[in-house]
Image (cartoon, rainbow, N blue to C red):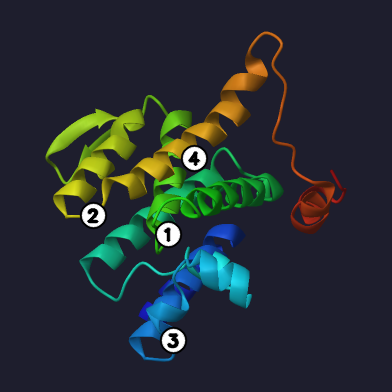
Amino acid sequence: MAYQTFRQEYLQMPPVTRAYTTACVITTIAVQLDLASPFQLYFNPILILKQGQIWRLLTSFLFFGTFGFNFFFNMIFTYRYCRMLEEGSFRSRTADFVMMFLFGGTCMIMFAFFVNLLFLGQAFTIMLVYVWSRRNPFVRMNFFGLLNFQAPYLPWVLLGFSVLLGNAIYVDMMGIAVGHMYYFLEDVFPIQRGGFKLLKTPFILKSIFDAHADGRLG
């Protein structure tokens, strides 16, 4: 019975959320079972550029640490806000959601070449939270029953909580910065006088992800 419930809930997840969270969980299980090592996954510019270990560009977003509080905390937030974005402001716009993933991931990789970051998943989660919070400014939030605040403050609350846990502040700050870049380019600049849409989803992404939505391309 529990398996059927879990399977039904899993299959009801929107595709991008399902793919990303599944990849994160599988990566963590592989490390937990010693099928892979964090040393094979972390972001290392030298190994990427000089030894062609390009898989690190992806795996550095998939590993949140071994099973424990930090892993489950990050995965809950990743799943929750990734799904709410995909089912909310990105409903029937899967290609645009993938484009946001590509934009955010590319920006973080560029930053990571200059900042000593080993894993980028936590920053990516904060980016998702930031974009959702700015698009839902009037939602009231409650953090562990201790704090009540409006949604736009959520990334900053998470940053403070992360610091209390002993994590580096620049990880969450990078996620907030990239999230704000996306929000500004997608939601703010186009509606300004003389503004226009800078982030345009390529036709190939629309043909792959959105063609089935309405039976046509574009």
Q: Which residue is mark 1?
A: 121
Q: Quadrant of the C terminus?
A: top right
Q: Is residue 130 above or below residue 8?
A: above
Q: Are marks 1 and 3 in contact (CB under 8 Å)?
A: no
Which residue lies most toward the right here?
216
Q: Which residue type does callout 1 highlight?
A: Gly
Distance of label 2 from label 4 (alpha carbons): 19 Å
Classify 10 Å Cα crowding around label 3: few (below 14), some (14-19), many (20 and above): some
Distance of label 2 from label 1 (alpha carbons): 13 Å
Q: Which residue type does callout 3 highlight?
A: Ala
Q: Are marks 2 and 3 in contact (CB under 8 Å)?
A: no
Residue 178 circle label: 4
Counting residues from the start of the chain, the first of labels 1 and 4 encountered is 1
Counting residues from the start of the chain, the first of labels 2 and 4 encountered is 2
Counting residues from the start of the chain, the first of labels 1 and 3 encountered is 3
124 relative to 86 in the view: left or right? left
218 relative to 166 in the view: left or right? right
Residue shown at 53%/59% (left/top)?
A: 17
Residue 106 seen from this side: yes
Distance of label 2 from label 3 (alpha carbons): 24 Å
| Badge 4 element | helix
Counting residues from the start of the chain, the first of labels 2 and 3 encountered is 3
Q: Which residue type does callout 2 highlight?
A: Asn
